[in-house]
Image (cartoon, helix red, strand yellow):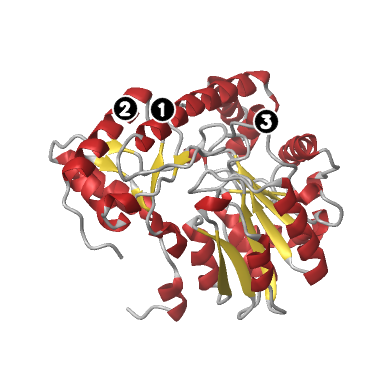
Amino acid sequence: MRFAERMSRLGTESAFEVLAQARKLEATGRSIIHLEIGEPDFSTPDNIIESAYGAMRGGATHYTPAAGLPQVREAIAANMASRGGVPVGPEQVVVVPGSKNILHFLLLSCVEEGDEVILPDPGYPVYRSLTDFVGARARPIALREENGFGMDMDEFESLITPRTRLVIINSPQNPTGGVLTEAQLDRLAELAIRHDFLVLSDEIYSRICFADLPRPIWTRDGMQERTVVLDGLSKTYAMCGWRLGYGVMPAELAERMATLMINTSSCAAAFSQLAAVEALTSPDSELAVGAMVAEFRARRDLLVEGLNSIPGIRCHLPQASFYAFPNVEGTGIESRDLAARLLSEAGVAVLAGQAFGDAGRGYIRLAYTVGRPQLQEAVSRIRAFVGSAAPATVS
C-alpha cells in the first residue's frame, strides 16, 4: 500500500507504547508498577455517572449540534468566566470528542504550510506531531529546570520571526509539573499583540494544582481575541474514557471549528456532554475533585522526597499536575536506557524524558497515578536498581 507523505511526519505517544510493553511483561507473571500513563486512577464521581445514565434513559443518544448542545456550551462558558473573571459567551465554545481535536482544528484553520509554531520542549508530544503533520515548522522553546521549567522570555523572543503564527503553552505542564509565572504570561501577551500571533493555552491540568495559579493569559487585555483555550474533563474529573474536551476561542474561529467537526466526528456524544454539565456545576463534583487533588499532593510529596533520597537523582517539586520529572544524569545511565531497564529489570514503567523533546534528555517522567504503597515500592525498586546497575554510555 502506498501512503501519503504526510503520514511520515506523524508521531506517537510513548506512554501507550511503554504501557503495551508493560502489559506483555505482566502477562508472563512479572510485577509491574505503572507510572507511565497520564490518567487518574480514581473513578469518575458517582453523580456524574448517574447523570449520564439519566441522560441516556432520557433519550440523549442522538446527534447534537456540531459545536455542542446549547446548555453544555453555556455551562462551559459560565465555568470559564468564573475561572478567569472576564465575560465568556457560549458562542465561543466548541465541544469535541477529545481535546486534541482543538489543537488539530486550530492548526488546520489558522496555520499555513511553512508557518512557524513555537512549542514547549519538553512538552506534550502531540504538539510537535500535529505541527509537523500539517506542514508547519516547529520552533521549540526549552523549559529548563533552573527556571522552574518556565520560559526564558528573552530566549523566547529570539525565536519570533515574521512567519510565527502560533505559540503553544501548557501551564500547568506535562511532563514537568511546571507553571508559567505572572511575569512570563504578561510578557508573552505583550509579544503576541506586538507580533500578531495566536496563542493556544492548554489548561487541561489547571484544576490539579497545589498552589494558586497566575491569571490565565486570556484574561489580559487584547488576548481573548487571539487565544484559544484547550481544556476538557479527562484529568479533573477522572473522565479520560468519556472522550470529552472543549475549546474556548473567538466566535468566528468557533464557527470554523464547528465546520471541521461536521466534516470529521459530527459531534461529541450527547450523554457525555450532559454529564459535563453535572461535572461543572455540581457541589458533589467539586468535593470529589478536592479529595483527588489532596491525594495527589500527598503522593507528590512522598514520591519527590523518595526520589531525592536516591544517589544520582534530583527531583524538582512540581507545582501542579500528577507528574514528577526527575533529573537522572547523576546515575551515569542515559535516560532512555534507564527507563527501558527500570521496566525490564526493576518492574517500574516510566517514560524517558526525550520522549517529550530534546530538552528532556537526562530526565524521566513518572506519573503518580497509583496509590501511596505502590509509590513507596516503586521508589524502593528504583533505589535498588540504581545502586546495583552498571552505568551505560551517557549521551
Give the foreground label among 1 and 3.
1
Residue 237, above or below 136: above
Q: State the CA–CA distance, disc 3 to disc 2.
A: 34 Å
Residue bearing mark 3: 280
**Label number found at residue 302:** 1
For the point 56% across and 45% down, the residue is 178
Where residue 114 appears, as percent x and y from the top left, is: 61, 81
Mark yes or no: residue 254 visible. no
Q: Secondary structure under badge 1?
A: helix
Residue 384 figure quarter: top left
Amino acid beneath label 1? Leu
- Alpha-carbon neighbours of circle 3 within 10 Å: few (<14), some, or many (≥20)? some
Q: Quadrant of the N terminus?
A: bottom left
Q: State the CA–CA distance, disc 1 to disc 3.
A: 30 Å
Give the foreground label among 3 and 2.
2
Q: Earlier in the sequence, mark 1 or mark 2?
A: 1
For the point 46% across and 26% down, the residue is 43
**Label number found at residue 165:** none
Q: Earlier in the sequence, mark 3 or mark 2?
A: 3
Amino acid beneath label 2? Gln
For the point 55% across and 69% down, the residue is 131
Residue contact at pointers 1 and 2, CB within 8 angstroms: yes
Amino acid beneath label 3? Leu
Q: Quadrant of the C terminus?
A: bottom left
Where residue 372 appears, as percent x and y from the top left, is: 37, 24
Which of these two is toward me, 327 or 298?
327
Residue 175, above or below 50: below
Residue bearing mark 2: 376
Where residue 310 appears, as percent x and y from the top left, is: 31, 37
